[in-house]
Amino acid sequence: MTHPAGPSYLEERSVRSWLFTRDHKRIGVLFLIATALMMALGGIFALLLRLELLTPRPMFMSADSYNRLFTLHGVTMVWLFLIPSIPTAFGNFLLPIMIGARELAFPRWNLASFYLYCLGALVTLFSMFLGGTDTGWTFYVPYSSKTPTAIVPVLVGVFILGWSTIITGINFITTVHTLRTRGMTWMRMPLFVWAIYGTSVIQVLATPVLGMTLALVAVDHWLDWGLFDPGRGGDPVIFQHLFWFYSHPAVYIMILPAMGVVSELVTTFSHKNPLSYLAIAVSTFGIAFVGFLTWGHHMFTAGMSTFDAGAFGVLSMLVAIFSAIKVSTWVGTMYRGSISFKAPLAYVFAFLFLFVFGGMTGVAVATMSLDVHWHDTYFVVAHFHFIMVGGSLTAYLGALHYWFPKITGRMYPERWALAAALLVFGGFVLTFVPQFLLGNLGMPRRYHSYPESMQALHTISTGGSWALFGGLSITLSYLLWAARRGRLAGDNPWYSASYEWYVPSPPPKHNWPATPCFELDPYDYTTYAPDPRGKSDVGGAPDAPGGAPPAGDAQGAAHG
Amino acid sequence: MAEPVEHAAHFESAERQGQAATLGMWVFLASEVLFFGALFVIYAAYRTREPRAFAEAVAENTFWWGSGNTLVLLTSSLFIALSVHMLRSSRARAACWLVGATVFLGMLFLGIKSYEYVEHFRHGIYPGGQGQWFADQPRAAAMAAFWTLYYLMTGLHALHVIIGVLLLSVIGWCVARRRVTRLAPQALENGAMYWHLVDIVWLFLWPCFYLTNGGA
């Protein structure tokens, strides 16, 4: 079936056409598949960890295997899934379309980034066959330079992944600067593009520091140069400074794209202009900037002056202010909007609840007097899972459902999706709320056993992890089914006014028929109001049924 | 009459594509600065703790070899900048000679650096505080940190010089073989920008390892 706008990007079917593609949409899909596989892998690791913690005594895993498994879980989830997932999959697919471009600035580098990602993933996971490593995903020295386990492949793998991230970041920044089409002024860029742009800046500036730091640990471990060894004039604490100089901004690499997704979803499903475009765009950069100045809050117990700790604490709290601006703007956008409650919006609600909860506990742990008690307990584990899973993963799932018809041209089954969303949310809360309580009781992170008195909470947490796993499995199953058998979605199933829905779904090979020219603001629901009930009463709205390409396409044709 | 300039289909003009290439290179260089930055931070932290040991260790390096290398690299940077200028004004032959001279000076730099490394090894100075030299040092631990950093930082820089030499050789060869598209000045300019970064990093390594010897 060929669309009047020309064959879609999915038309060519050979394996070769996928593996050597330079089409940003296809590379986005490749990244989507690869990162989803990694999420499944990391999820299975997590499930095994939770199962082992069902009883206070060892069940089926030695303490040693437990250490290796939680390291693998952390490394896989952070570097193979959370950091690349939204930017490389959805950013790749949508960013050029959203700014009216036909490609990213450097298509070949884009493909290279994908293969570097694959190489990095393989090298990292190769360590599993050598027995894995047991340092945790933070690789703290001095232990990481002495551990007898296979740490070097992990470090080298993450180093390679870092370059993949940097290349993608350079590509996105350059694309936003040089390939915006006519009429696409900075203040007309979709909010998702702002978020990806801010993320790219962090990726480009923070990742090299991590790369260097991990390379140094690898050299220390491999050649015994002792750069962080106090016996040879070194200082292990400087490692922590450098590690967190990257790894704290990395949290914003994970959460900013998620916020970008939420901004898109909120406007589409409220059919309303954002309460303040400017507030959302500017606070993105507030977070990106302040994020570079907060790393010290990971090191309150590592030997830091009270003044420094106070400064880092206050700077960390600034992030909460920018986040609160965003949350208020999203909620304000929904107020008196024409809400259509679909699975993506369900994930937005989950995001809002979990992110605010996680953020508030973040303010709590940024306070030194509290953190010295919570440091290295389950409280911190629960806090960052609320942000990473409750924030990033729910936004990722929301994005997946929202753009599923854009990517595949087909609809997912709505009822199954809502049921799965409920299960994911419930499972998540059940898994991690008990961990806040456990942390408060003094349960340290990364422990393989615990006192009998804590078993009830651990059992609830393990049960929750199975519900979460169930929800994600259902999601995976119906999405795989819907990609081939789902009903055809039409070009704009959500009646969205966002730019990416101006082009057909799935988009044609070169996105836009010619060089388009944007004359409307993004999310302009006052001028262009696609009505879900089919009554288009405002000028500029599409006549064709099913929300065929509205104004933008006509504009493009007129100017091309 | 000006020929239509070839450019990739997703750019509206060759000029725009050139801007993209330049911007991409600048962002990459920013990334590289942070990459080296991590090592400079470690150097600063360790030196603040042991200022005297570091100054004494700097004095161990030969001032003239390091300063000579500075002269070599700065001159090479001048040549590559001139080469870009020549190619822009369609004097491809002169541009080729200048790229050749830059590559030669890059290799001269590497030669001098290698000679220095060999000299250190002969004195028993190895990374990680290993070697005979450290046995009779009063501040052996801090000295070990200094020399490990010395090998790491100058080594990483030398690696960048090697990459730069290879990169410029390829670009120079393409220009010489007249595989010159209208985008060749852009490729040469990006190569030159990379070379300038290599040069600038050295301008910071030079005081760290050769000049700040505490007046010894």
Image (cartoon, coloured by chain):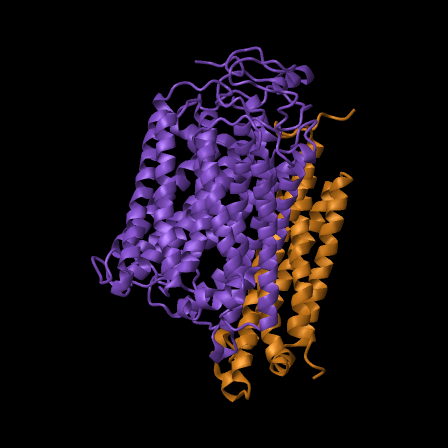
Chain colours: A purple, B orange
Point out residue A69 in the picture as x, y percentages from the top left corner: 31, 56
Q: Residue at x 51, y 83 (%)?
A: B134
The extreme front residue here reads A336
User: Which residue is more in the foreground, A130 or A73?
Assistant: A73
Q: Position of residue A181 (x, y in %)?
A: 66, 28
Residue under the point 50% across and 35% down: A90
Of the 4 image quadrants, the one containing the C terminus of chain A is top right
The reply to whether residue B86 is in sight is: yes
Q: Residue furthest left?
A: A59
Write down the quadrant of residue A337 in the picture: top right
Q: A163 or A477: nearer the eye?
A: A477
Does residue A427 appear left or right of residue A388 in this picture? Answer: left
| Image location (x, y in percent) of residue A227 | 50, 72
Q: Depth check: give the residue in front, B153 or A392.
A: A392
Image x and y of residue A158, in percent = 45, 54
Relative height, residue A506 to residue B75 (above, below): above
| Any part of residue A391 in sight | no
* Above-or-below relation of B24 to A7: below
Position of residue A399 relative to residue A141, above or below, is above
